Image (spheres, rainbow, N blue to C red):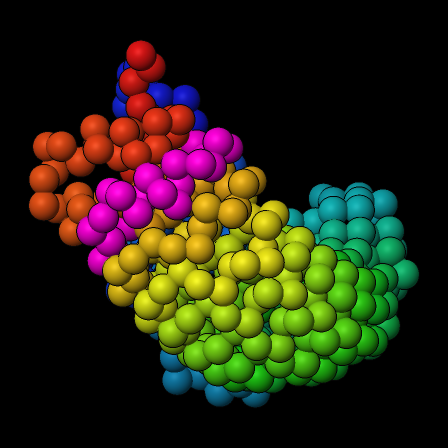
Amino acid sequence: MAGAPESPDTAPPPVDVHDATADNTLTPDTGEKKDKPRDSKGWDGKLRLNKSTSGDESPVARLKSDTEGESEDDGPPPDQLAADEDLLDDVPADEDEIDLVHLRISSIPALKLERFEKLRRLCLRQNQIQDVELPDQFAPTLTELDLYDNLISHIRGLDAFTQLEILDFSFNKIKHIKRIGHLTKLRDLFFVQNKISTIENLEGLTNLRQIELGANRIREIQNLDTLTGLEQLWLGKNKITELKGLSNLTNLKILSIQSNRLTSMSGISGLTSLEELYVSHNAITDTTGLENNANLQIIDISSNPIEHLTNIKHLSKLEEFWASNCKLGSFEEIEQELGPLKELQTVYFEGNPLQRRQPALYRNKVKLAVPHVKQIDATFVRAT
């Protein structure tokens, strides 16, 4: 999972994607393997583009503080409008991609986008947009709309944009998923860090392959039964207590539900295509419930009160096993459950009683229990 080591037996430390005990600001995964957490303590919201930040304050916090106290009906100041109007003066009308990131844009109409009738991708990340007011001229061609990190409270203005395949409303102020049910070509849908409490109005979006709803207020997995083609579901940092409502998602390959309120892994037996399971930072007490998930390649159960390792040895395709900061104390259980798994390359057990009791002997004992692994915690195993 990590890159090449800096020395023969030491890899660079894993990147901390998000400490669940810290604030809600997410930082992108900068590791070599995209879309996978690089640290077992990290929340897994996959941010696809880096934020252009400066200083310690996040763009979200900065934009909110800049606009605090303003009415949603107040228009942008005159000097702001003038600046917006000039941004695209030198861009040819046949341009098919426009990126306007972190420019304090507050009005889409002020950009005068009507002349870009071939526009395929529009990125307006990290601005101060409150209303989605897009001209219909490029509705027949627009396939990707990125409004990540703005001030949007309500989804409106997308009636004509039926060709959209990628839609990103992450880091806004949206409470309800509405007015996107007609966007039946959507493949990737992002609502990370909003105020959503219910998964709703997605039933007709049967072409969806990826949904990201991390860092919201969701308590229940529901209304996904028709999305049988879904391959990735990201629900980290919500308030979910049970793994239910997933039985129809037989094509699901990645399930991330870190930093929730789960007490068990039961409820995923029907997910026979599942390859990656991330359930760290919950209240799970055992590793039962994986009997039918024979295609699992990565499991992250870190930061759960799990005392015993069981029900793992049948997962013959397992490559990475993350179990840091649990309550595991037996090297014998590690040998029994993980020793037979010949595809296993990486294990994490730091922060467990078995590591804290005899830290000087810990790595050697893990190597004896699982002799074929190539990485233990953040360090590569020295070749012998």
Position above or below: 317 against 71: above
Q: What percent of the width, then of the height, locates residue 133?
A: 72, 73
Quadrant in which the N terminus appears: top left
Q: What percent of the width, then of the height, locates residue 360?
A: 10, 32
Identify the residue at horizontal 83%, vertical 48% (top origin): 93
The answer to which quarter of the image holds residue 108 is bottom right
The answer to which quarter of the image holds residue 134 is bottom right
Q: What percent of the width, then of the height, locates residue 161?
A: 82, 68
The question of residue 83 being in magenta is answered with no
| Residue 313 seen in render | yes
Position above or below: 201 against 166: below
Left or right position of 119 against 355: right
Identify the residue at horizontal 27%, vertical 65% (top origin): 305
Position above or below: 222 against 288: below
Q: Which residues are magenta?
A: 324-345
Q: Out of 67 and 357, give the one closest to the viewer.
A: 357
Q: Residue furthest right?
A: 140
Number of numbered discs on residues = 0
Q: Out of 210 and 78, give the one closest to the viewer.
A: 210
- The secondary structure making up most of the magenta span is loop
